[in-house]
Amino acid sequence: MLLWHLPMAEPTAVPPSLFTRAHAPPRLQRDAAAGSAVFAALDLGTNNCRLLVGRPTGRGFAVLDSFSRTIRLGEGLEQTGRLDPSAMNRAVSALAACAERLARWRPAAVAAVATEACRRAANGVEFLARVHRETGLAILVISPREEALLAIESCTSLLARAAAATAAAAAPTRALLFDIGGGSTELAWLRLDQAGRPSLIGCASLPVGVVTLAERHGAAAFAASGFVAMSAETALLLAPFEAVHCIAREIRHAGGSGGVLLLGTSGTATTLAAIALGLPRYRRSLVDGAVLTRDAACAALAALQGLGHGGLLAHPCIGPDRAIFVRPGAAIFAAIIAAWPAPRIMVADRGLREGLLLRAIRTHREPRAGPTRAP
């Protein structure tokens, strides 16, 4: 069943080595060449394990299967510098479920990557070796820059949509993409052409995410003072990126014309969009690509802060698995829009795994092409 469709973006500089051909029989290899094969992308993050399976359709793909499970792989990492045994067991269990799905779909290629938790952990390599032994999955740890480029890949069509939906004089010429993850927050400062096609100006990975803040602040995260402290901590980490790129100055010079667009790709951003839209339950079709005014985003932040712990648990767009992480994510979001008060914030319910899948498809369509040069 087709769940959604994503168009393919222009190439960005992610190494083709991320995308390995599965051990497929000749028939599946022929299908891959013809564009009718199945491809898969797996994202092992600090807080979640996500799988996406799709088939190429024109310049994009149709989703055939998806999987997401909260695993809290980064639990305790802030204190110990190591992955906790219980967290690793949860992750292996989720990855085993992914391996079973992949065995059913028999994809022509699988792109499987790990991010901040495995980058930081002293036992990250040892853990991934265990994953390979127990599930057969070969997972590659990617750099923060590669992570940012893959998020850009997945959002290129939304940026084109933003350009097409506005008059030429008001079309964004710059975009700041931010992805609030479990163990880190990725920033990418982009130049946009008239069609909304992005080129990377600069990127940064901040050592703060929803898991790290939740563990650092504990129960205080649910107090107003804790929210202010988390946001202030994030603001200090944003300052060096602002000093280099002068994003706030560009926003001031653009005024209300919308020359700078903020683009949030995280679960925090999608949750706040759902609250801003007043959705009784989460609907991806309404959230992905939604554009919030700054006032609407601030109102959603205020509404979320007013929910309290019980309200977060009961909210249909949040739920028990994510309740402890939403306020830390919202504090990061609040710091970002305070540092860079752009008039519009676009929200994307897509990210790393969608970028992985798009790139895996392109790699197999162009098997002889070498890596492209970074923008």
Image: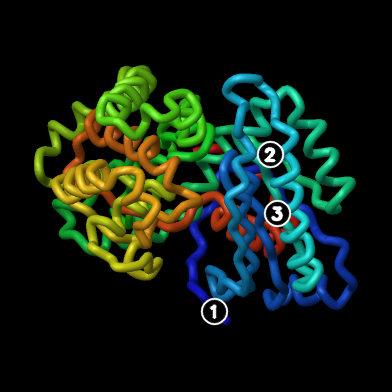
Q: Amino acid at mark 1?
A: Leu
Marker count (numbered): 3
Q: Earlier in the sequence, mark 1 or mark 3?
A: 1
Kindly give the residue lying farthest to the left in the view shown. Answer: 256
Q: Say which amino acid is labelled 2.
A: Ala
Horizontal side of 78 relative to 290 (left or right) equals right
Please state which of residues 211 and 161 is positioned toward the viewer in this rendering. Answer: 211
Marks 1/2: CA–CA distance: 33 Å
Mark 2: secondary structure? helix
| Residue 176 on image: x %, y % | 34, 39
SS at mark 3 in the image: helix
Q: Residue at x 41, y 33 (%)?
A: 201
Q: Is residue 155 visible?
A: yes
The residue under label 2 is 87
Pinpoint residue 332: horizontal percent, then vertical percent. Answer: 35, 33
Residue under label 1: 2
Question: Along the horizontal axis of the image, is 280 left or right of 205?
Answer: left
The answer to whether residue 159 is above or below residue 27 is above
Q: Is residue 303 left or right of residue 362?
A: left
Q: Nearer the viewer, residue 194 or 201?
A: 201
Which residue occupies 71% across, 62% down? 364
Q: Measured along the vertical axis of the image, is residue 330 above or below residue 194?
A: above
Tell me the quarter of the image containing the N terminus. bottom right
Which residue is disc 3 drawn over? 94
